[in-house]
Image (tube, helix red, strand yellow):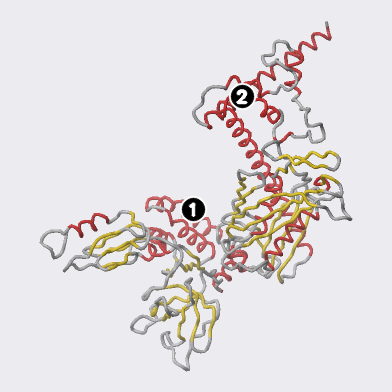
């Protein structure tokens, strides 16, 4: 199947529309289409939709030897896959110039700006480092693949968790993610790309071109920035002559768009984490009440967000201040059999160790019990503080 | 309801009972009886005396004995007599190559226009939109089309100037071409526009100004999955848009 060629009627109409500050799908000049960010079951799997354009990005990692002249630096590699599924015009040959261009723009935005810390990918200097691989797949091309792929890449990198490792001398042990919580990559900032399409005249441009506008456009500028308004990369293609102030104007528009997109990304990540927490607890409850307490304990003590105990000895567990204090100080604590590893969840499990019908019911039960427990601990903290204050004055 | 028989035969009754039900490719629809005249339309296939569905869709019956499968898809397969909107992708002295979304481009001879002679050929450039009628279309040859009706008059065929063209599914295109198309009727009451509908799913619309065209194009596009009631419900919002355009102008 071939793609529909652009007729001169369409080209003239699109340009006339833009001249009159409107677009043929009803958007305004600076409007993006609806953006949706979704994450998959596995860590590092992100799907981004901008209008009908859909991309999927998958992040994976493996241990490799570093370059001899850079013994402490890990690698991050980008692979762009534009298949004919996305657009019949994409050829099946190895790497078309367009795919290479897109890959380079995204790579520059993420690597040159040092968004991902490659030093933190070092496991054993000179011997083993992590090589992170970002595979970008275009699923449907309705225009503006670059922005979708860039957003998908940073979303997948933020979502990804690498396996935990223990190094004893020269021996490296990699702990599978089902044994120990994975560790998020060290990402300093969020580079996000915004593309502008130009139509022969530097006054005529739109943000986020769709498929027809992309065919009609004469040139394109992609600005990659982070929410702190720092420019990570600027890329201009096509034969349109642009004065410098036009490019500056584009970056100003991009600043606004990027902060909105970064906000959407953070929200999507937060919601995904919530869902994972609830699902995990529901699974444990359904799998057999308090019986799974010990293994889950280590993990429940810290959510996926708060895993900072990399540097500590593996055995030590970091408790939430509230739970620790309450168990050590108050003797009336209901969950104080041993003070070594008590977390909020430990107290919850006996309460909810009842037969529950479905995972969803269990999840709801667990979430409710967690809320109740949180309130109880907060109340305990308050009474403890009041007691300490009373004790001081007394 | 049977035409010639004394009593309705069981096979015909079976076919009738299947009308307006969903059929899948490979479903046995019925059997051809002796002396019964039957017209088998698109989506149905006959093997010996048995009739099978070849497409997924709803089996429809048109009195007295016409059956076809009402289905929807986006990929166009050229058929003789279809009216299509195509884009000229190549031209030479004798002919134009026109893309209609089929597997092969359609050939339109330079002489297949009203008043065209060897000395006086139409001046149509590459990228132009053409409204034409398929004169030859089978799976073994490159399809051909002409820009005249049977009598040799242009009758609306030929180059479409200005306006905007967009793609819809084949089902929506057939609906738009139908006798009573709700969305075009409703739009026609509220604004002035010209349109050419292609059976290949390409639609061309032209209005006085750009904004009205945008409203009409989006109204047609969005009406794909709407019932008549929903289309009528869409109209007040549309009127608002059109009024705001005339204020701006």
Left or right of B41: which side holds A293?
A: right
Whole-number angstrom distance, CA of label 2 to CA of label 1: 64 Å
The residue lying toward the viewer, choosing from B36 and B102, is: B36
Q: Whole-percent x and y of residue B194?
A: 44, 69
Q: What residue is at 85 percent from the left and 55 percent from the top?
A: A67
Residue A48 appears left or right of B33: right
**Residue indicated by mark 2:** A291
Q: Are marks 2 and 1 on the same chain?
A: no
Tag 1 residue = B240
The mark lying in front, picked from 2 and 1, is 2
Q: Is residue B194 visible?
A: no
The chain under label 2 reads: A
**Which residue extends farthest front?**
A171
Q: Which mark is residue A75?
A: none
Up-down relation of residue A24 to residue A49 (above or below): below
Pointer 2 local density, CA inside 10 Å: few below 14, some 14–19, many at least 20: some
Above or below residue A363? Residue B18 is: below
């Amino acid at each position: 199947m071939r793609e529909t060629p652009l007729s001169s009627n369409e080209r003239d109409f699109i340009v006339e529309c833009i001249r009159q500050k409107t677009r043929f799908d009803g958007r305004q000049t600076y409007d993006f289409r609806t953006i949706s960010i979704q994450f998959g079951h596995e860590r590092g799997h992100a799907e981004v939709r901008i209008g009908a354009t859909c991309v999927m990005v998958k992040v994976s990692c493996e241990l490799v030897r570093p370059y001899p002249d850079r013994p402490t630096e890990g690698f991050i590699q980008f692979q762009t896959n534009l298949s004919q599924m996305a657009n019949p015009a994409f050829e099946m040959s190895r790497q078309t110039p367009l795919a290479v261009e897109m890959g380079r723009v995204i790579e520059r935005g993420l690597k040159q700006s040092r968004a991902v810390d490659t030093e933190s990918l070092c496991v054993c200097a000179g011997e083993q480092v992590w090589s992170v691989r970002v595979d970008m797949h275009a699923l449907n091309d309705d225009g503006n693949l670059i922005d979708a792929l860039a957003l998908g890449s940073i979303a997948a990198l933020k979502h990804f968790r690498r396996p935990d490792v223990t190094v004893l001398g020269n021996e490296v042990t990699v702990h599978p993610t089902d044994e120990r919580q994975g560790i998020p990559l060290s990402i300093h900032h969020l580079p996000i790309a915004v593309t502008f399409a130009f139509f022969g005249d530097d006054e005529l441009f739109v943000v986020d071109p769709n498929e027809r506008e992309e065919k009609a456009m004469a040139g394109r500028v992609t600005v990659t920035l982070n929410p702190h308004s720092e420019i990570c990369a600027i890329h201009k293609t096509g034969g349109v002559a642009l004065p410098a102030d036009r490019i500056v104007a584009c970056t100003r528009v991009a600043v606004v768009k990027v902060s909105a997109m970064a906000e959407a990304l953070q929200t999507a990540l937060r919601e995904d984490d919530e869902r994972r927490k609830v699902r995990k607890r529901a699974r444990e409850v359904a799998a057999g009440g308090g019986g799974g307490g010990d293994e889950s304990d280590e993990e429940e003590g810290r959510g996926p967000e708060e895993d900072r105990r990399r540097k500590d000895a593996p055995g030590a567990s970091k408790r939430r201040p509230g739970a620790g204090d309450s168990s050590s100080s108050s003797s009336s604590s209901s969950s104080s059999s041993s003070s070594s590893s008590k977390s909020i969840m430990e107290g919850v499990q006996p309460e909810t160790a009842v037969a529950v019908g479905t995972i969803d019911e269990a999840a709801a039960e667990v979430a409710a019990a967690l809320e109740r427990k949180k309130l109880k601990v907060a109340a305990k903290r308050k009474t403890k503080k009041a007691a300490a204050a009373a004790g001081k004055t007394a | 309801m049977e035409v010639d028989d004394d009593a309705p035969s069981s096979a015909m009754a079976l076919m009738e009972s299947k009308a307006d039900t969903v059929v899948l490719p490979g479903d046995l629809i019925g059997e051809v009886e002796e002396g019964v005249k039957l017209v088998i339309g698109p989506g149905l296939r006959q093997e010996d005396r048995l009739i099978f569905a070849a497409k997924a869709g709803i089996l429809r019956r048109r009195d007295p004995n016409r059956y076809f499968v009402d289905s929807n898809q986006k990929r166009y397969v050229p058929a003789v007599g279809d009216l299509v909107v195509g884009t000229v992708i190549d031209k030479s002295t004798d002919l134009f190559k026109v893309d209609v979304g089929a597997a092969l481009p359609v050939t339109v001879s330079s002489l297949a226009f009203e008043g065209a002679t060897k000395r006086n050929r139409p001046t149509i450039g590459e990228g132009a939109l053409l409204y034409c009628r398929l004169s030859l279309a089978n799976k073994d040859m490159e399809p051909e089309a002409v820009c005249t009706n049977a009598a040799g008059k242009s009758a609306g065929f030929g180059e479409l100037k200005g306006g905007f063209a967009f793609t819809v599914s084949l089902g929506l295109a057939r609906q738009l071409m139908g006798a009573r198309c709700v969305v075009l009727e409703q739009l026609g009451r509220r604004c002035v526009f010209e349109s050419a509908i292609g059976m290949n799913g390409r639609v061309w619309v032209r209005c006085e100004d750009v904004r009205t065209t945008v409203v009409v194009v989006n109204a047609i596009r969005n009406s794909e999955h709407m019932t008549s009631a929903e289309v009528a419900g869409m109209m007040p919002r549309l009127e608002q848009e059109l009024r705001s355009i005339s204020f701006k102008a």
